[in-house]
Image (cartoon, rainbow, N blue to C red):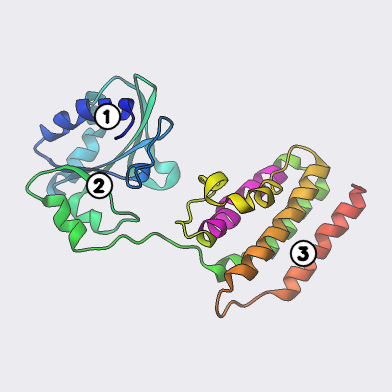
Amino acid sequence: MPPAIHQAFLDRALPRLQADPRIVGVAVGGSWIDDALDEYSDLDLVIACAPSAHAAVMRDRQAIATALGPLLNAFTGDHVHEPRLLICLYEPGPLHVDLKFVAVDDLATRVEDPVVLWERDGAVRVVLARSAACFPLPDPQWIEDRFWTWVHYGATKLGRGELFEVVDFLAAVRDMVLGPMLHLKYGQLPRGVRKLETLAAPDVAALAATVATHDAASGAAAMQATVRLYRALRDQAGAPGLIRHARAEAAAVAYLEQVIAHLAL
């Protein structure tokens, strides 16, 4: 069962969505799929409408969201390249609810199989049944092609004393590279660094070592830990056909050590 606050929102919102003839179904994704919803979870709703009504629903999405409950704030998902998404904060709680407004046929392209909460005449399940979810997986070659140039970039920021840049750089590498690689190592979908504290417990210390504070010595140690962890994960993954950029690797690591020596850390 979902937490009471999530269920209360659905009990209030679903009848109002069902009353709109343009809407043909409501599904829920995210933690709900794995029965992992807790009091801190967002509610990820997919609101499917008839293709001919999608443009009108998109125009009315703010009004639709407002009608679902006491709305504190709402904004579009343009910053994550998803204009169909309306990110909402509702009372009581507050509760974070994502409303993704899609034409029902667009559900054929998806990264997960949502749970259908309600549908009109089987409209949602028909589309889900004739298509398959496809979660984007990291490409080991794409990572290797970039990683050592990124290490050099981070080392230049460290050498210049731009420590906020170092902190942000390391966070980006964890989210784009180390986190997804750890998820895959433990048989999980590569969702950044989400829940790695429990999903990748044996490697938590190694990942934690890549976290830097606004301090040159901390940044240097975290950079070195990032290199170590990437090398270990790359070797453990054993990606067939991976072309390693050995010269770039050697040059970037040597430059990082040169910067650290220059700073006398």
In the image, what residue occupies the spot 40% across and 42% down?
A: 78
The residue segment tinted magenta is 165-183
Q: Is residue 188 left or right of residue 168?
A: left
Name the quadrant containing residue 249: bottom right
In the image, what residue occupies the spot 64% across and 70% down?
A: 235
Callout 1: SS: helix
The reply to whether callout 1 and callout 3 are in contact (CB within 8 Å) is no
Q: Is residue 233 left or right of residue 190?
A: right
Judged by its main secondary structure, the magenta piece is: helix
Within-10-Å neighbours for mark 3: few <14, some 14–19, many 20+: many
Callout 2: SS: strand
Q: Amino acid at mark 3?
A: Ala
- For disc 3, the marked residue is 252
Q: Is residue 169 left or right of residue 191?
A: right
Q: Amino acid at mark 1?
A: Gln
Whichever of labels 3 and 2 marks the residue nearer the N terminus, that label is 2
- For disc 1, the marked residue is 7
Callout 3: SS: helix
The reply to whether callout 3 and callout 2 are in contact (CB within 8 Å) is no
In the image, what residue occupies the spot 48% across and 51% down?
A: 191
Q: Position of residue 217 (x, y in %)?
A: 83, 44
Q: Is residue 218 above or below residue 126?
A: above
In the image, what residue occupies the spot 35% across and 56% down?
A: 111
- For disc 2, the marked residue is 115
Q: Position of residue 53 (x, y in %)?
A: 14, 44
The residues bearing labels 2 and 1 have C-alpha atoms spaced at a distance of 14 Å
Q: How many marks?
A: 3
